[in-house]
Amino acid sequence: MKRRFMLPAFGLAFCVALAVSSCRTGSEVVYAGGGRVAMDSLWDVAPDADAAALLAAYKVKKDSVMGAVVGKSARAMESGRPESLLSNLIADVLRESAAQVLGHPADVSVMNMGGIRSSLAQGDITVEDVFEILPFENALCVLTVKGDVLMQLFADMARRGGEGLGGARLEISADGKLLGATVGGKPVESGRTYTVATIDYLAEGNDGMTAMKLAEEKTFPAGMVLRDVFMRYVKEQAAAGRALTSRLEGRITVKN
């Protein structure tokens, strides 16, 4: 008799064990597959009453914290390659935050699109919004690099079709080649030293940013988780009566 099993996508070892066990019992595995189960509103159709009662008190507390309004956005912002409103904004916040280490903004800032996990709607910004946009514990890292290494970093970014960038402008080709770069409006000098504000995850060469491993110096200031830095920025703008905004400035342009 043939029996059909649905196995989890991560269960390779389990699949092998099941095949051996089935053979011993005279059965035969004819299909093994996996997939994702969306955790959406479908699961709220018939909620478990006991679980809902248990969680109710925690939900009130969570909503009171996460639903707090910390600022406003003058426009809707999303992230995307080669350049976007939200990635520009976060890159600028990163660049400015390096002043706490350097005494001035970094020459360049780099933020990966993969680290930005949601968009920002126009209007009120809540604590939950900030957590959804920046859910990871990524923290500020300030790098010191020579110009030739900086150009390698820009080439890494070009291969990925663009990433969040501040303080510089790149021209890249549609097939991912770096065609030109300037920092502060000037060509990059190979022997000059530049500072780069980024996150610790990228500073270790992850997400294709292998050039960062060649940095001459890396500083990881304590208490500078990017989400917290961004939250402070939102609150500071609100205290000054300003709503968040951003512009597309041609920081990364694609030439065909």
Image (cartoon, rainbow, N blue to C red):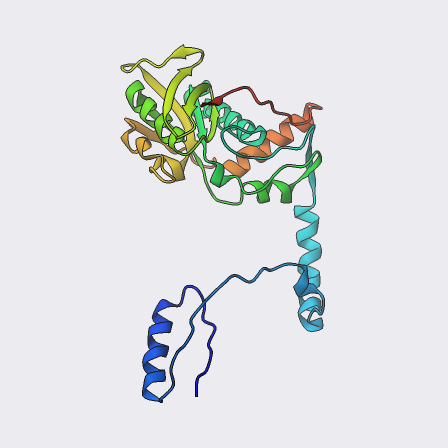
Q: Position of residue 130 (x, y in %)?
A: 60, 40
Residue 178 can be seen in this image: yes
Please tell me which residue is depicted at 27% across the width and 30% down the height of the picture. Answer: 214
Whether residue 77 sits left or right of residue 161 in the image: it is right
Along the line of sight, the residue nearer the viewer: 123 or 78: 78
Along the line of sight, the residue nearer the viewer: 103 or 48: 48
Residue 225 can be seen in this image: no
Along the line of sight, the residue nearer the viewer: 168 or 100: 168
- Is 244 placed above or below 184 here? below
Q: How many marks?
A: 0
Residue positioned most to the front = 256
The quarter of the displayed image where residue 25 is located: bottom left
Please tell me which residue is depicted at 34% across the width and 70% down the height of the picture. Answer: 13
Q: Position of residue 122 (x, y in %)?
A: 70, 33
Whether residue 145 sits left or right of residue 76 in the image: it is left
Q: Position of residue 146 (x, y in %)?
A: 29, 20
Q: Position of residue 206 (x, y in %)?
A: 36, 40
- Is 12 placed above or below 190 here? below
- Is 20 placed above or below 41 here? below
Quadrant of the snapshot with the C terminus? top left
